[in-house]
Image (spheres, rainbow, N blue to C red):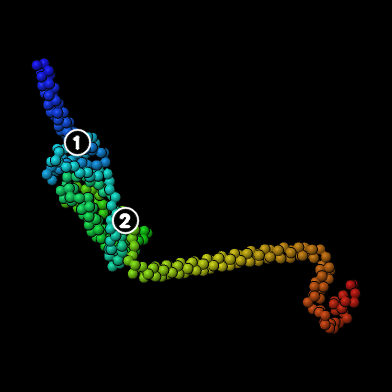
Amino acid sequence: MTNFQDDQNVISLKDKLPTKWFRFLIGGGIGLVLLVIALTNVYIVHENEYKVVRQFGEIVRIDQTPGLRFKIPFIQSVTSLPKTQIFYDVAEAEINTKDKKRILVNHYAIWEITNPKEMIQNARTLENAESKMDEFIFSIVRTELGRLNYDEIINDEKSSRGSLNDEVTAKVNELLQQDRYGIRVVDVRLKRIDLPEENEQSVYKRMISERESKAQEYLSMGDAQKQRIIAQTDREVKEMLAKAQADAERIRAAGEQEAARIYNETFAKDPEFYSFYRTLESYKTTIGEDTVVILPANSPYAKWLLGQTR
């Protein structure tokens, strides 16, 4: 009897063991599934992004503060949008200036999302937002540059476009805010201005011609200035020479006057010597190499020539 009861207990224990393990496995599987579901519905909000939570396609909340968040499994979905500033290279555009010149302009824009909900509702995607922003930038740049002549745009010395970049930025933001796109342009900058290829050569030739004309103008101005300087210098030289000549004449006259005074004082002391000196001086002018002199015997010249000093 005892052996029979022991056999029944063993059989009962064997029947209970599979049921217990089965329940454990079922519970562990359910727990694992719940853990996986929990982990897949936990998300992290980083500092440089927005987390947009949708439920059946509708936005239920937007998380901006960094941290750990949860969403409802199978019902809610999470997407990310950048919170940082975004660089956008605006497509090259052809614009006609006020004087009917065609130019190609290149811009770039720095923009950011200010209201993710409005951006999603009205622009839907980042690409659509950039496309709208591109349209506004092109429209405003075309209007602003269309008011200026070509030379005013490319020549900084003659430029009257002033703070064009700031004006474009402000007007683009007005349009974006008016249509509630939830984005803001931080800055719009002009990178370069080019000419259409078919216009480059003609413009280069015109620029060369203008530079040559300007160079000739400078040469003419320089030559005229040179002639004025030469004339001024000649006039000053003549004035200086005339003054020097007048001073020389005054000095010479004073010298001759002083010499005459000295001669008079000297000759007055010896009239006979003065007579002799004057006679010798007259010989210099009256007697030459071929001069034939016929003098009376009592002529003073004859006396001097014959050595009759008395």
In the displayed structure, 110 sits above or below 61; it is: below
Residue 23 position, x and y percent, is 13, 29
Q: Measuring from the top left, give residue 41's x and y in whole percent.
A: 18, 37
Question: Image height check: is 218 above or below 70?
Answer: below
**Is residue 52 shown left or right of residue 187?**
left
Q: In the image, 229: left or right of 106? A: right
Residue 217 seen in this snapshot: no
Residue at figure coordinates x 18%, y 42% from the top left:
78
User: In the rendering, which numbered label is found on residue 167?
Assistant: none
Q: Residue at x 30, y 66 (%)?
A: 102
Q: Amino acid at mark 2?
A: Leu
Asked if residue 75 is positioned above or below residue 215 in the image, the reply reads above
Residue 190 circle label: 2
User: Looking at this view, is 85 or 187 the one in front?
Assistant: 85
Q: Residue at (32%, 66%) from the top-left corner?
A: 196
Q: Position of residue 191 (x, y in %)?
A: 33, 56
- Identify which residue, 19 or 24, lies in the foreground: 19
Indicate the position of residue 223 as horizontal and vertical percent values.
50, 69
Is 45 situated above or below 188? above
Instruction: Specify the quadrant that holds the N terminus.
Output: top left
Residue 2 visible to the viewer? yes
SS class, disc 1: helix
285 with respect to 90 (left or right): right
Please tell me which residue is depicted at 12% across the width and 18% down the height of the picture. Answer: 3
Asked whether 57 or 230 is in front, the reply is 57
Q: Tell me how far mark 2 sits from mark 1, CA to CA.
A: 52 Å
Disc 1: which residue? 36
